[in-house]
Image (cartoon, rainbow, N blue to C red):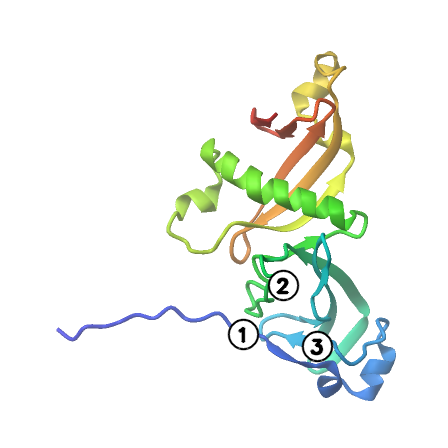
Amino acid sequence: MIPVTLYEIPYFTCDVAPVVQVLSASDLAQSVARLKDGKHLVRCLTRRQAFVSNQAVVIPGKACVFDAMTINWENRAWNFVDSEVRKYAARINSKGQCPEVDYREEFYPGQHWTEIYPETTLEASMEIKNLAELSGIALLRKAGLPWGKYKRNPDDQAKLHVAAVHEVKAEQCLDEGDRIWPLVWPFNKPTQCYHAAMVRGYGYVEWMVFAKYQDGSIRFKGTSYIIA
C-alpha cells in the first residue's frame, strides 16, 4: 500500500499594499478618512470588505494601538460611504515592541489584538482585556464551565482569546435573581460591567460578562465564580 499524506489546506492570506499603489486618485479623494502615505490596504479574497490600516504604535506605559478602516468593495467598486473605523490594542512585549498583525483571513488582525470600542477608554479596555484573558478564561475553564466548541475540540490549536471589549451600564451585570430580589444586594452593587467577546477561529464567539462590585470583587455573570 502506498502511504498517503493529507495536508490541511492553508488559510487564505490577504493582499497587503500601500494605499497609493492600490487606490486611484479619485478613490483617495472621496475617502472620508483622508488616506495618506504610510497607510496600507488589506484586501482578502473571501471578504467583501477591505481594511485600510496604519502602522501600530506604542503608547508608552499603556499598550500598542492601530486603527483599521473597513471599506466595502466589490468588482473594483469602492464604497467609502459605509466605511467604519475600528481601533485595536495589544500588550507591549518584553522588548517594548508591538506584536505582528496576522493577515490570514480568519485571524485578522491576530490573537494578540483586541478591538476597543470608541466609548471605552484605552486604559479601561486594557483592564478588561487583562481581566478576561489572564484571569477569566483560565479560572472559568478551571471551574469546568461548558464552553461548547472549546470543550468538544480540546486538540484544536486555535487559541481562545478576547477579540473585543467594551463597558456597559452596571445594571446589565445583574443576574435575574438580583433583579427579582433587589434586597439581597443593597450594600454591594456592581459599579462597572464589562463585556468581552471571546473568539476561537472563524465563526465562534462567546461572550464573557463580569462586573466590579463596591467591595472590589470581580463577579462573572451567570456563574458563582468570584475573584475577591
Look at the image and tell me whether residue 207 can be seen.
no
Q: Residue at x 56, y 68 (%)?
A: 105
Q: CA distance from mark 2 to mark 3?
A: 20 Å
| Numbered circle sitting on residue 40 | 3
**Pointer 1: residues within 10 angstroms few (<14), some, or many (20+)?**
some
Q: Quadrant of residue 130?
A: top right
Q: Nearer the viewer, mark 2 or mark 3?
A: 2
Distance Cα–Cα, label 2 vs label 1: 24 Å
Q: Position of residue 194 (x, y in %)?
A: 70, 38
- Return the x and y of residue 37 as percentages of the image width and height: 78, 81
Element type where label 3 sits in the image: strand
Mark 2 Cα shell of 10 Å, populated few (<14), some (14-19), many (≥20): some
Residue pictured at 70% horizontal, 77% vertical? 40
Q: Are marks 3 and 1 in contact (CB under 8 Å)?
A: no
Image quadrant holding the C terminus, namely top right
**Looking at the picture, how far across and down is residue 31, in whole percent?**
84, 75
Q: Amino acid at mark 1?
A: Thr
Disc 1 is placed on an element classified as: loop
Whether residue 96 can be seen here:
yes
- Tag 3: residue type? His
Q: Are marks 2 and 3 in contact (CB under 8 Å)?
A: no
Q: Is residue 175 above or below residue 112?
A: above
Residue 15 drawn at (x, y percent): 60, 79
Mark before the other along the chain sequence, 3 or 1 = 1
Residue, disc 2: 97
Query: The N terminus appears in which quarter of the rendering?
Result: bottom left
Circle 1 residue: 13
Q: CA distance from mark 3 to mark 1?
A: 15 Å
For discs 3 and 1, the disc positioned in front in the rendered view: 3
Tell me which amino acid carries mark 2.
Gln
